[in-house]
Image (cartoon, grey):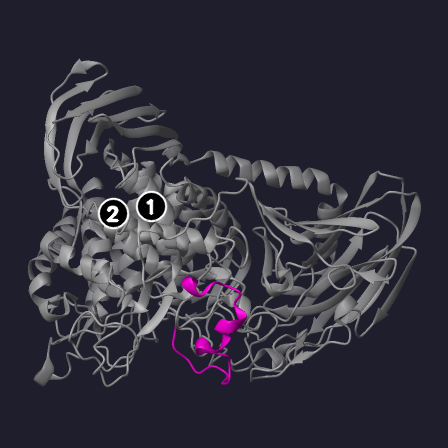
Amino acid sequence: MTPRPVGRSRPTRRRTTVPAGLIAGATALALTGIPSTAIADQVGSATPQPAVQNASELSESTRLADRRSLVVGDRAYAMGDEAGLYPATGWHIRGEMGGIWTQPLKLLDGIWFGVDGAWLGKDVAAAKYTSGHGYQRISYPSDVSVERTDFVPDGVRATVVGLTLKSSTARTVKLDVDAHSELMPSYPWGWTTPNAAQVNLPDTGSYADGTLQFRDQGTPPFPNFAAHDYNALVGSSLRPASHALGANHRGPQDPAVICPAEGTTPARCDDSLFGKGTGGRLTYDVGLKPGKSTTVWFAVAGSDLSKAEAQREYRKAISNPEKLLRAKKQDRAAIDAMTSVDLPGDRLLQQSVEWSKQNLADSVQEARDLQIRDVNEGKDYPAPAGTVDSARFFGAGFPDYPWLFATDGEYTSYAAVAAGQFDTVKQHLRALRDVSDLLNNRSGKVVHEVVHTGDVYFGSNQSAGNTDETVKFPSIVALLWRWTGDDRFRDEMYDFSVRNLQYVYRELDKDNDGWLEGLANVERSGMGSEKLDSTVYLARGLRDLADLAASRRDRQTQQWATAKAEDLEKRFETQWWVAEAFGYADSIDDPANPANDNTPIFQRHWTGVTPMEAELVRPGKPTSPLASPEHAEIALDQREKPCYTGEFGLFHTGTGPTADPAGNPGPSCDTVVSAVKSERSIFSLNTSIMAVAEGNFGRLGENQQQVYTTGNARIQLDPTVWETPGAMPEIAPSPDSPANIGRPFYDRSMNLQAWGAYGVLWPVVHQQLGVDPDLGHGRLAVIPQLPGGQQKVAGSNIKLGRGSVDVSASLVNKVLRTDLRVKGIRATVTIGAVLPTGATVKAVSLDGRSTQYKLVTTTRGTEVQVAARGGSSSLRITLR
């Protein structure tokens, strides 16, 4: 992706120069407020688990001004702090990524409220912040108590805020509302050519019809920029008693502290040098009855198209806010009802499933009229190649990555299908296809990063591109087809999927050895041009394309993809396994150098786990990863050690021997010397990859998969760790990545990152509950595996196609039981269970009658498989 602040390296983001001087390293650890155990390098089975809070709400009462808040809808979102203020946030446009947005347009730096001259969040302190399913609430106790509720209605380009006031005595209060505009598109950014400051034009402010109205009209003085008319409206259903206009109007944040263009001071600021907004105030007289609550609603709406559209969106938001909030809660309750799990042995993970489903829903974004152009990593601004009318997708992360990505969306799709959120996956894939085909002239190459404006930062035919995300695309099509049986969608995506793999062999295998060249998830010095994760995902993509081709009776493509896959699989272990490192090479050297051709390079990156993470569907064989079981056991054992794993999960890059010239800190687990320094940053994605890999090999024990599922659950749900309650962040507090709460708001990783849900939903639904649909072929297998030390797992309303399944697995007194209910699905059903290690079968019965069964050896262990009818089935396996 795009540049990262110094000291925080993303596993999938693009390398580019970033403004220097941003805070890094362990210097901020003292500010985190997190116990020292939270940044330990060791992981043990006694990792503390916090008490589970209310399922639909989570609350925080400490250091609210240091924590980011977030409310999201598909057409708008808002970010401030949990005290109700709006510090300058984010770093793509430094300090401008927070506030109130309706993509591709920022509307306001913030909105502030004062009661009888006392500003909420400063003069009246916030006592509690509550994150709910689709909304947030902030409580301000005082003589006049105030409860602030923020939400973003889906389908509306507006953010809605309700203030509920209550007094013990009758009184009329003066309610001031300040708003400061910043009508600015999401691209260009702070370091691009041209940059955000050069393109941003001054805002004007006015008052009409009881609303503050802000406008930015004109044409930036650079080639290929069109005339624009940006508009924002702020108001209430009440009529204001007075109003004021002026350059400031930031409530308690006047006068504004301006973020410098670079550097680390001040630690907190209010606006950036890019800002050219203006402000206004609305004042209301609100009568209160003794002991009675009175709610006043406000809306911030806008448009990048016209004043008339902004006014329409404002009317939608303010006409009936209570109805819109009810609808939002009902929609989120419906999401909560799908993939509802009962994990009595791991209530923290159960709660993480519930919130991860909401995180996915919070990540949905929609853009209209995308002007597709290749900005060449911010160096160019050409005329657009064309227009994509609309795109709906999983935004990668907030506040700096809310747009469309291939890599992020491909990982996120596994979580989304497990949560039953099929439609957004389909729309995400369509968006990638449409943008890629338009920009890349139907070459088959998948673009990497697309802003809501349509600007493609990276991923054109002319750029290096990310090989892994092109080869992953057919696998996500196959994934969705298997979970839905939707042949129409398969057919819609088939041509593009074929062209994906034709492209990589045509353009990215110059030495014809089958190992593709190009960039992948990790870009570090010393890596060879052929990357491990691209190889792994290519092998999976070939098998998935062959499966899609077979279903369409395209024998030519089926045979081509199968032959390519078989060739890679046959040669993989010999080429990539590095015995002295107890793992797989991260890359192979530059094939242009004949003296070192095909020499493995081992650097300990997280991508070394991908051979165990990606499952390959091979006809007539159990689905299994690319890694051999023997090497997988060695590699996973190694990755569990403290040289690779910290308290919250898997490091980006493990630690090497102390004699390593790179000076890698931390314990060493092998003797291989690498020129790459360790990066003990724990990304929620890295941890997800390890959790899934462990589950693929039946390693569900307390010191195995549970370390990683617990790691992601804790950074989302543990009050001693979280920044925003219930939000899965991008990076965990790590030895080399201090917790966000101790960093400046303009130098933080994402407080909500969609891909972390992969390491929660997929392990629970696909591995523990064993839900394995192949509805494209009319088959369904449900073969649970109980995690080590647990006696029961269950899930209900797990959506498959147009139906769903309920499943429960338990082990009591040597009876292993699986109960299954299939609803609305036409498929051949296999029910079963994975035997505990060392157990053998004494008897098997289905629905109370002895039945025939098969014992199948898989990478998960020995599976008992029984043919079952549709409807309800109860399988009992008596163990010796």
Q: Amino acid at mark 2?
A: Gly
Q: Is residue 24 magenta?
A: yes
Which residue is outermost to the top? 849
Quarter of the rendering containing residue 800: top left
SS state under label 1? helix
Q: In the image, residue 620 lies at what x, y percent? A: 10, 40
Q: In the image, residue 38 lies at what x, y percent? A: 42, 62
In the image, the segment drawn in magenta is 14-38
SS state under label 2? helix
Quarter of the rendering containing residue 818: top left
Q: Residue at x 51, y 69 (%)?
A: 748
Q: In the image, residue 606 lies at what x, y percent? A: 28, 65
Q: Are marks 2 and 1 in contact (CB under 8 Å)?
A: yes
Of mark 2 and mark 1, the one earlier in the sequence is 2
Tell me if residue 495 can be seen. Answer: no
Badge 1 local density, few (<14 within 10 Å), some, or many (20+)?
A: many
Q: Is residue 15 magenta?
A: yes
Q: Residue at x 22, y 82 (%)?
A: 660
From the viewer's perspective, is 191 left or right of 292?
A: left
Q: Nearer the viewer, mark 2 or mark 1?
A: 2
User: What type of secondary structure mainly makes up the magenta span?
Assistant: loop
Residue nearest the viewer, comparing 584 with 308: 584
Asked if residue 164 is positioned above or below residue 849 in the image, the reply reads: below
Tell me if residue 729 can be seen. Answer: yes
Per the rendering, the mark at residue 762 is 1
Q: Residue at x 40, y 67 (%)?
A: 734
Identify the residue position indicated by label 2 in the image: 695
C-alpha span from label 2 to label 1 = 9 Å
Badge 2 local density, few (<14 within 10 Å), some, or many (20+)?
A: many
From the viewer's perspective, is 67 left or right of 546?
A: right
Quarter of the rendering containing residue 327: top right
Q: Amino acid at mark 1?
A: Trp
